[in-house]
Image: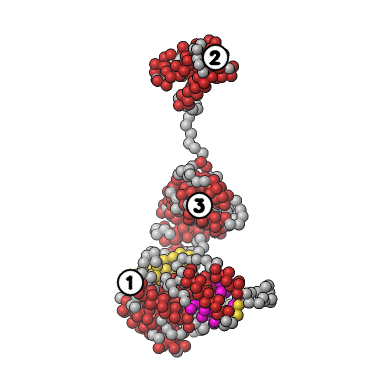
Amino acid sequence: MDLTPLYDLRERLRAGAIAGAALTGEDFRLSRALEALGPLEKAAPVFAKLGQLTRALLAPDCPDRAGTLLEALSLADAVLCTQGAVSVSGPVAPLPIRARGKTVTNAPYSLLMPLLDALTTSGGGRYSLVLETHQQRPDVFEDYRVKDAMVSALGASYSELAEQVQSWLSQEDEGILPLIKHNFDPRGKKEMVRRVQVIEAVSGAKENDFYLEQIPKAEGDVRAALVYALRHNPGNVEKLVELCKTEKGSSKKMAHWALSKLDDPVAWAYWDKLAEKKPEQVAVYMPLATTSKASTAIADAVVRWLEPFEADSDRPVQLQDAEKLQALIEALPGKSGPEICAVYRRMAALGTRLDNKMLTGGPKSDKEARFKLLWVDHGSHKNWVFSEMVDQVLLRSILYHPTPDLLALPAELEAHCETSFLASALTAALLSKPAEEVYELAKPLLTADDLFNQKKRQYAWQVLDPATHFLAWDQEEHRLLFNTPYHNYINGGYLWVKQPVLEPLDRRWYKDLQRPKEAFAWYDLLRRIVDLDDEPLRLEVGEYFYQQALKSKDASSAYLHYLRHLGWTKCEGLAVHYCKTKGKLAPWEVHSYLTNMPGSLEDRKAEGWRVYALLEKGEFQYQLHRGRGAQAPQSLDHLKSLIETLPGHTQ
């Protein structure tokens, strides 16, 4: 449809408005434009209406020429707006990468701009703002503008923010990759390392060409990250063997870590050759590897270490011997099979023969041969003698990889060896035995009569603590399980391995752990293993902790954590007993205790007023501190204010 007559008509109407409505009747150009509109008037009623208004405007007896002109001009503009179109010449091109995203959210400026600033600038308070926004408005993070800012935040100076954003981006689909790759700098710093980690988390082996393309240009930690990403594709095995030989520094380490993830004959040929010269170096890269080949390699290396000491009981322990064994025991968890079980039997057969030997050679020659278990956080600062270390390594190996042969081994060693394997035996029983059988094994450790004897109690805890240290009720999975950490040698932090117990605990565990004397280590075990879905049990243990708190002599606030964990709601008498036990109170102590007690806000305030009443009677002292060494008189008005402004909390 040719709209030229319509445009011409609008131009003459506009000219008439400028010249004056009274002159439009004499405008021959307007009459000519109206004639040209004729064909369009037949095409649509709206055009006919416009022609009718224009004729009325041109009529000599038009009663309201100005109003008619305005109405005709408005209709012409409206019609042209509906017929408008925009186009450009040339080929169609995709939108720029930085404009990509799933959607534009209808987020208010007051929400979006502070979030973008927090992600792209420096300053305090940014991390909490980003977290709160993500919790309250996760939809905003689908906005392409926010995604662009999130990529920028991978280079944030505040590492917690950068790591959190990396975690979120790693959960995206492959649509995020163009944004991550945009302006990628293989010679960059930590931001580029995080970009590589996001890419491999999202796409893994699919981006193998990208990793290979960038490695020759990359430097430093970015190069190391790209090398480690090659583990996703088994076809990279020969490339990784080459890099293990040619790379240096962190890239060389990452090439070995990546190669250790590939169960391939080419890879094992490299490891076997390395093990002939430096078996401890092979062990460094084998933690948590569960393949039979890895188990065989580590077993062979440990056997070569043991043989000289088995042949000569008087052989001294050289410093380099201890360092080799240190590397080997860190690789044992996760390994299983006949060779590994044989290794544990041979280590156990040595008994305590290596326990009291002094290191020889090197600057540490005046110290006893002891070993640090880097993946054990309970007693992590403890250096273990050889006989204790064997039980601990077996225990942890069972938690990571509970195969039938490993589960059966501790009971065998406990029955036939001079040293104790009761801790690993109890752990294995929890994972594989009926509840009653597990209780009978633990009963000597749990029996209350034994625990009045300090030495027996100390021994019981030395066994029970490692056996149950990572045992706890998991409210998300609604079951009791071990949640065991292992040091992540590659990226830092910890890896976590979950193993559920075979059957819920025999209820006698809970009875035996409700001991009459204060023993907070035992209390924490009791708290952790309570089935929170079992209301009668939860209330029973809650009542026990409540009564213990009312009798406590050390005014510990640890009970409050136990009670709130169990969903206990009664708080009467708790703060009163706490204040009486303390005797002299600072304001923050009273406020903290009242805040963290179980119960509703009303109940906690009521307990606060009971404390206030006793203060009025002079039962104990309440003092405000004015700087170091100075004190003010008692201020009950101050306590009133604390009670009245107590915060609420979620049970």
Identify which residue is drawn at 56% across, 74% down.
590
Residue 578, compared with residue 114, is above or below; it is below
Q: What residue type is labelled 1?
A: Leu
The residues bearing labels 2 and 1 have C-alpha atoms spaced at a distance of 97 Å
User: Is the residue marked by circle 1 packed among few (<14), some (14-19), or many (20+) residues within 10 Å?
Assistant: some
Please name the residue that numbered disc 2 is placed on.
24
Point out the stretch of residues depicted in magenta.
573-592
User: Is the residue marked by circle 3 packed among few (<14), some (14-19), or many (20+) residues within 10 Å?
Assistant: many
Q: Main secondary structure of the magenta part?
A: helix
The earlier-in-sequence mark between 1 and 3 is 3
Please name the residue that numbered disc 1 is placed on.
502
The residues bearing labels 2 and 3 have C-alpha atoms spaced at a distance of 72 Å
Q: Which amino acid does label 3 sit on?
A: Val
Q: Nearer the viewer, residue 644 or 205?
A: 644
Among the 4 quarters of the image, the one containing residue 452 = bottom left
**Position in image of residue 177 (x %, y %):** 47, 46
Indicate whether residue 574 is drawn in magenta: yes
**Position in image of residue 445 (x %, y %):** 40, 83
**Quadrant occupied by the C terminus:** bottom left
The residues bearing labels 1 and 3 have C-alpha atoms spaced at a distance of 40 Å
